Image (tube, coloured by chain):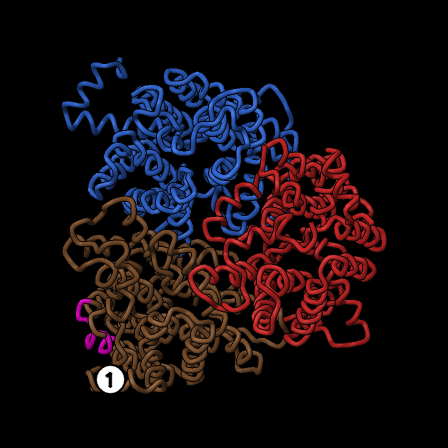
Chain colours: A brown, B blue, C red
Amino acid sequence: MVDGNPWRRLAERHRGVEFVDACLRGAAQVMLQNNPLTGLLILIGIAAGAIHSGHPRVIVGVLVALVLGTLTAILLRADGRSVRAGLFGFSPLLTGAGVTTFLGNRPLTWVFLVIGAVATTVVTLALTTVVNSWGIPGLTFPFVLTTWFLLLGAYQFARATLAVPAAPALPVAGAPDPARLGGETGLDVLAGVSQVFLVDSWVAGLIILLGLIVNSRWSALFAAGGAVAGTLLAIGFGAGADAVGQGLWGFNAVLTAIALGAVLYRPSGPTAIYALIGVVVTVVVQAASTTVLAPLGVPTLTAPFVIATWLFLLPKRNFAPVPQHERHVDGLFAALRPDGGRTG
Amino acid sequence: MVDGNPWRRLAERHRGVEFVDACLRGAAQVMLQNNPLTGLLILIGIAAGAIHSGHPRVIVGVLVALVLGTLTAILLRADGRSVRAGLFGFSPLLTGAGVTTFLGNRPLTWVFLVIGAVATTVVTLALTTVVNSWGIPGLTFPFVLTTWFLLLGAYQFARATLAVPAAPALPVAGAPDPARLGGETGLDVLAGVSQVFLVDSWVAGLIILLGLIVNSRWSALFAAGGAVAGTLLAIGFGAGADAVGQGLWGFNAVLTAIALGAVLYRPSGPTAIYALIGVVVTVVVQAASTTVLAPLGVPTLTAPFVIATWLFLLPKRNFAPVPQHERHVDGLFAALRPDGGRTG
Amino acid sequence: MVDGNPWRRLAERHRGVEFVDACLRGAAQVMLQNNPLTGLLILIGIAAGAIHSGHPRVIVGVLVALVLGTLTAILLRADGRSVRAGLFGFSPLLTGAGVTTFLGNRPLTWVFLVIGAVATTVVTLALTTVVNSWGIPGLTFPFVLTTWFLLLGAYQFARATLAVPAAPALPVAGAPDPARLGGETGLDVLAGVSQVFLVDSWVAGLIILLGLIVNSRWSALFAAGGAVAGTLLAIGFGAGADAVGQGLWGFNAVLTAIALGAVLYRPSGPTAIYALIGVVVTVVVQAASTTVLAPLGVPTLTAPFVIATWLFLLPKRNFAPVPQHERHVDGLFAALRPDGGRTG
């Protein structure tokens, strides 16, 4: 058992194992989990999905950025407990996925990967100062900001090649070919889970869900529920069939559902309703972000999840929206730390 | 008399009347007033304007969102005094006007109306946490943000029809047909007052001004002055005749003038000068916002008022711009509460 | 000697001299220096560069805005020590350069110059309230925000003529004619220093560097190093030859290098590495900003410097990135004040 006491004791004694442990937890923290086995399964899921969808380069990007980002945090003497909980690994990991997915295979891409991994950790430290003053966590916003900078910046350089989903264009009203509910919808939902890591693969989605189950069944349940709800809402509103088929309406909803429903508020009936409203808002914000970014030709990444979840976390401080089942504000960060999670 | 003591005693005894009272105050709070009679006259003005300008649907949108937004605040256990003062009604009311004005008459529009009303209240609670840390009120920004999300999001859905004033286009320098001072300018100024509620109708403008007079003559004076100044500045700078004729250069200036000149600072000579500079900046920010939003095809709504007013309120905390006639910083919120207004 | 004790004693006795001293320090504060002689040399550099590059109007814009902005701060009773240190002069000065560089010679331009100078000071006061809560300075952001508002606003008015570098257009991937390292690169680097003031002139760059040397050799060294690094990185990434030749990849890097390497952290080996990473991020952010602003047809101004420097300053508060050579957080502002600088 990777996550049992023997592994933990090993990690406490050997600095090398401790670092591997921090990196595995970093992979798990993308899904707001603090468990090295979950992280391992997620990395296996990403690898399977990257090969399945024909982008094996993404595996290198993810691993290099995860290691470099965590190392940068150690060099900058960031809070040790946070480093060990993987809180400086998850955003760089995603930046690594973003750079290797959306930039072509040229030397400058690998330079951008290194810049991106280091910068994501600096941005994580910077953002923490800002959002701490309102009692909320930074979530994956350091990844979003850094990756936007790198992709938008790549437009200006002859040595970079962009592989973005759509070239810059003014937004046009209405989806060209609206999606319909059908036999494929189940697979679209699973792809929605894997798209958290920018991978379009129902196989990866299954493995990642398994990774959630070993740490927190509530998180797995809300992840699956979020993917279903996000995809169904998009189909109901008349979103385009292509995006639905790639699971693109699922991944932000997955993250919002886990964050609001299972991790940052205590699971309960009212919490589930609050999380569902959060998922509805996530879908609207994702559609809006797609429109805003159309003239710039870059993807929304996980910005819709971050924006919607911030909006549904911020009321906690001065008001009591879901009082009987919310943790104390100070617990917000504890929930993302080793001793605050379900497994240590 | 609706606003006399009998009404107040009735509202204190019956929960239904108390709720109606909170909704009426919500309508008044769009203009930063805390008076149910003002709210009633404003609702009559909106209704008259909606019929006068051929958009009767807006009446339904305004009433449904006002009620739903206030109810959501109660369900989320928001601060009771703020709810009773209408502070959770005014932004949803405007979201209701925005959705029914800028989305076509299809089933999804009414779904968006419900989502928008609920979301506006969540955004109000969230924004309060952020702006409280700087000692300023959120103003109508929850309406602006939520309505932008809904309109921008609608582009991605086949079941939504946009009725925005202009399709997405790159900005072009220079107005095609600059406005001139003329016999119509007086009516344009009154339409500027009604455009606070997205209605283009001088009749509505007159009724709304009447609603201001019954609560605060200073507010009515600054509202009229703001509309005149905004419209004249736009004409002087060479703004397009169409927008001037629809009162679109008046409504943000109206709100800035009321906020800076009559409500959030104490009325006086220096305050009037400070508010006038605020109105000049509002007109520049409105022009800039129009340019920024041109490629996205959505209107500025009241964002220029919010941005300009925030810029002219924030200095209060650390400096003393207009010291002899400003209220204490802690009074900012009191001014927007039942016992801080001129009538209770 | 302008900066010796006699000048200081004169400034303390005569209010007129004190005001001139504050304005000269305002010119120096653009480069984060607090020295009237540096300010005088910078003004001479701007004048030489404005004539050298054929834009003599800029001299008037710079002087009028510097004086008006400082006067506005005095009228609004801003903190006296900050006014005397020139902290209310540097952003208006840049707004003056921006308005007279990017708007054509028409009456409305001069109206916008006055509005811009006054508004920049209000924005400085407002921004200070916000960024103070995170322990960082506002840098030149008030100039950036105000000038963006004025230029973007000018699109909507028939009485304004825009002289922006490029008309609104959707971003296109890849530079049309990438720059190469060559005999001109040295002059491009010096132009990079003068572009801090929106002036393209290696003569001006030389004079401005001289102004830095008389106050702080570290600042001069990091300014030159920043210009070299920014320009070389842009050439290495494959940026367009035109922009490199105008020094446009130097000026943001110059400011980041001075801020992070010489003024806001204590100069040392690790600080130099940290500042170099900051310069790399500045170049990426500048490229990204260029892409984002392409559809709006306005220049990035010094926004990339502000964003990158904020990101590298914010970690200071909760973490200890470069602990052994950073000043205490409270020293951040002192460093920008009369008694915190190297000369008083």
Q: Is residue B255 visible?
A: yes
Question: What main secondary structure does the magenta stretch of the protein show?
Answer: helix
User: What residue lies at 50% left-to-right and 24% top-to-bottom?
Assistant: B325
Can residue B107 be seen from the camera position used here?
Answer: no
| Image coords of residue C59 (percent x, y) | 79, 45
How many marks can you see? 1
C241 or C126, nearer to the observer: C126
Give the camera-side residue of A51 and C39. Answer: C39
x and y percent of residue B299 in the render?
48, 42
Q: Nearer the viewer, residue A77 or C62?
A: A77
* In-image side of A319 versus C35 (left or right): left
Callout 1: chain: A
Q: Badge 1 is on which residue?
A: A9
Q: Using the image, determine if residue A295 lies above or below residue B19.
A: below
**Left or right: where C61 falls relative to A30:** right
Q: Residue at x 46, y 29 (%)?
A: B259
* Percent of width and height locating residue A241: 35, 66
Give the vertical position of B185 relative to A215 (above or below).
Answer: above
Task: Say whether residue B3 is magenta.
Answer: no
Please name the residue shown 30% across and 26% down the image. B338
Q: Is residue A23 above or below residue B19?
A: below
Of residues B195 and C37, the one nearer the viewer is C37
Q: Magenta part of the protein: which range?
A: A209-218
Image quadrant occupied by the C terminus of chain B: top left
Mark 1 is on which residue type?
Arg
Percent x, y of residue A273: 19, 53
Please tell me whether residue C199 is drawn above or below residue B135 in the rendered image: below
